[in-house]
Each structure stands twice: as structure tokens, then as C-alpha cells.
Amino acid sequence: MSLDLNVCSMDTFGTAIGKYAPDFELPGTDGTVHHLARLLEQHRAIAVVFMCNQLNFLYLRDVTQDVAAAFGAQKTPHVFLLNQQGVLCYKGAIDDHAQDPGAVKTQYLKDAISAVLSGAAIAQSSTEPVGCSVKWRNS
């Protein structure tokens, strides 16, 4: 797999493209604690998506928001795609029309996953996330 580790994000905080993602352990709705390093051992790519919790599938809870801050999450949803080595390969929006699925022309996340799995370069490694701003807890 070719990955240009010299590519850097212009973001002022969070994980930059081409850098290792912060490791974490978070509790899931299944009652199990999930560890990023263990997930990376089992999968060729991991998508970390920060979103609101109106869901009917397994998800992890970042109660302290430490993981969201370490990744640099700004909106919900905000997607971060890691390769099997734990390197951030894509971050941003899921697609180019969050409010109108019928108008989607570019599926950023799907395209990035395909590129990571095939060992190809990701055409667009960063996009602006679209959604509500992350509501940060007061300390």
C-alpha cells in the first residue's frame, strides 16, 4: 500500500492526514470496552465517525470527549478513516450532499475506503465535514 506520509493537514488541532491516529478504549452499547489497536488487528481499515447517538446499532461512547478532541472532530457527523497501521488517510464528510441522498455525486468515504483497501492513492484525503457543530462539554 502506498501512503504519502508527508501530506499534512492545515488544521490547527487534531490528527493530521498521514499521522497516526490516537489510540483509544471506549465502552460500546454492547457492554464491552473496544480498543482501537485490537480493531486494527482484525480489519484492513477502520472508519471512526463522530455523530449523535440516535442509533439502533453498536456504537462506542466517548463520554469525556477526549477521543473527539484528539481526532479534531468539528461536526456531527465527522468521519476519520484509518488504514490497518492506524494512520489517518481521510477525514471530513461522508459525501457531497448530506441533506439530499438523491443528489450525491461523490461518495468521499466510500471512495476513500475503496482506495485504502486496494492500495491506491486517495483522490481527496480531506473535505469539510457537514453537520451540526460538536457540542463540547464544560469541564
Image (cartoon, grey):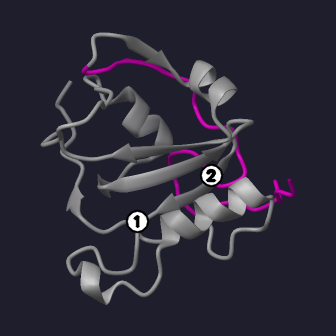
Element marked by disc 2: loop
| Residue 138 placement, left or right of 58 | left
Residue highlighted by disc 1? 94
The x, y position of residue 117, in whole percent, is: 71, 54
Which span of residues is magenta-colored? 1-29
Residue in the foreground of this view, choosing between 116 and 126? 116
The x, y position of residue 108, in whole percent, is: 50, 71
Amino acid of disc 1: Ile
Number of numbered tags placed on the structure image: 2
Task: Give the residue drawn at x 39%, y 80%.
Answer: 96
User: What label does residue 12 carry, if any?
Assistant: none
Q: Is residue 118 visible?
A: yes
Q: Is residue 7 above or below residue 71?
A: below
**Dominant secondary structure, magenta:** loop
Q: Is residue 46 above or below residue 95?
A: above
| Residue 18 placement, left or right of 70 | right
Quadrant (top left/top right/bottom left/bottom right) for the C terminus: top left
Residue highlighted by disc 2? 16
Please say whether residue 3 is one of the residues in the magenta stretch: yes
Amino acid of disc 2: Ala
